[in-house]
Image: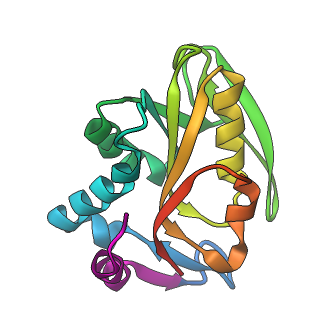
Amino acid sequence: MTTPALAARLKSVIRDVPDFPKRGIVFKDITTLLVEPSLFREATDAMAKPFDDDGITHVLAIESRGFILGAPVAQRLGAGFIPIRKAGKLPFRTESVEYALEYGTDTLEVHLDACGANARVLVVDDVLATGGTARAACALAEKIGADVVGCSFLIELGFLSGRTKLGSRRMTSLVTF
């Protein structure tokens, strides 16, 4: 569980970049967090902690900033790491799912043999915005036979109500804007 003090420290280092990647969007830049080794570790530990006792076998992380957070979360949980990538980026046979974006559609892929049928998966990403990407990642994990135990995010953009797209799934986020 995130303490108010940790949330405040994280908010103080996450930088707003206006009009990126396009006009009208305020991008939450986490590179300012990543250069602070102790805070970076504290954040990934806090993302993992709620799932310590859930028998997580794999952390499935979403390209690309999710990889940065997902790998240390996987190590903390003693779990394997599964990259979810955009279409055409993985070298072996894949399963895919197409999903809607605010401005079109996209496709996520995972290796067919990324985990076994009894895998207990935690989905990790940097930001929960509208929820479409996270929902697609959960669907993709289930397509390859995994049980999605929950989702862990560094940042939640609460005003976009992405949490609703995850339904009754267990979900945590360290800071909400």
Q: Nearer the viewer, residue 45 or 33?
A: 45
Q: Position of residue 85 (x, y in %)?
A: 58, 37
Q: Is residue 10 above or below residue 110?
A: below
Q: Residue at x 79, y 46 (%)?
A: 99
Q: Is residue 164 above or below residue 85?
A: below
Quadrant in which the N terminus appears: bottom left
Q: In the rendered image, which quarter is residue 13 located in?
A: bottom left
Q: Position of residue 31 (x, y in %)?
A: 34, 67
Q: In the rendered image, which quarter is residue 131 located in?
A: bottom right
Quadrant in which the C terminus appears: bottom right
Q: Residue furthest front?
A: 53
Q: Position of residue 108 (x, y in %)?
A: 68, 38
Q: In the rendered image, which quarter is residue 118 located in?
A: top right
Say whether residue 25 is left or right of residue 77. Answer: right
The magenta region covers: 1-17
Q: Residue at x 65, y 20 (%)?
A: 145
Q: Residue furthest left?
A: 38
Say whether residue 76 is left or right of residue 54. Answer: left
Residue 105 is a magenta residue: no
Residue 4 is a magenta residue: yes
